[in-house]
Amino acid sequence: MKKILFLLLLPITCFAQGEISNFWEYGDGTWKISNVINDKNDSYMIHKDVKQGSKSSGFSYSPILYLEANGTFYSRDSAPCGNQCIYYSNGIFKKIDETHIQLQIKKSGQSGLCPGGKKVNRKRRDLGIFEIKAYEDRYDLIKINNK
């Protein structure tokens, strides 16, 4: 009976791992994200298969996340023209295991037409470890430790 139950659950487990491993296949590196990576948010939604400026996405201009194979990231707002305030951050990420990622900001700031003008923060900030949860249309990054 245990063997039958194991065989029934095996495809579900393999499918879930396949979805997570897709997270680590950076694609072209461009994903829509719920917010620019920052030291205030404890969770982010990363939408699958949504490219910047894609008419099929329903919302062409939103925060973008670039994950690079060398372990760096760049996150920024996007806008149709340059007369808006653009927030950004960049840093490094570390793959802890298939379902966990550690994020650290190296630099963040704002540019464009922002209240207070252009600002840059070069203070390194370890954001901690986030669990990666895979869904059909998105990944959720949920902070699991408090840094």
Image: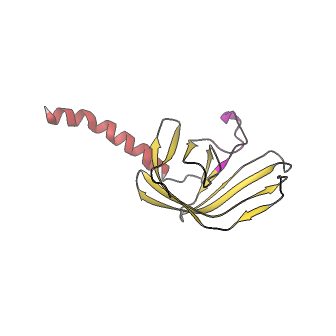
Q: Residue furthest left?
A: 1
| Nearer to me, 132 or 121 | 121
Query: Is 88 on the left-hand or right-hand side of 26?
Result: right
As drawn, 7 above or below 128: above
Residue 17: x, y in percent?
A: 38, 45
Residue 93: x, y in percent?
A: 52, 61
Residue in the picture at 40% in, 53% down: 98
Q: Residue furthest front?
A: 146
Residue 75: x, y in percent?
A: 65, 54
**Colouring scheme, one of rainbow, by chain, secondary structure, one colour:** secondary structure
Q: Is residue 55 magenta?
A: yes
Residue 133: x, y in percent?
A: 45, 43
As drawn, 57 above or below 24: above
Q: Is residue 25 magenta?
A: no
Q: Which quadrant does the N terminus fall into? A: top left
Magenta part mainly helix, strand or loop?
loop
| Nearer to me, 124 or 88 | 124
Query: Is 63 on the left-hand or right-hand side of 43?
Result: right
Residue in the picture at 84% in, 51% down: 82
Q: Quadrant of residue 127?
A: bottom right
Query: How many discs mark residues in the rendered view?
Result: 0
Q: Quadrant of residue 116?
A: bottom right
Residue in the picture at 70% in, 56% down: 88
User: What's drawn in magenta, residue-wise?
Assistant: 50-64
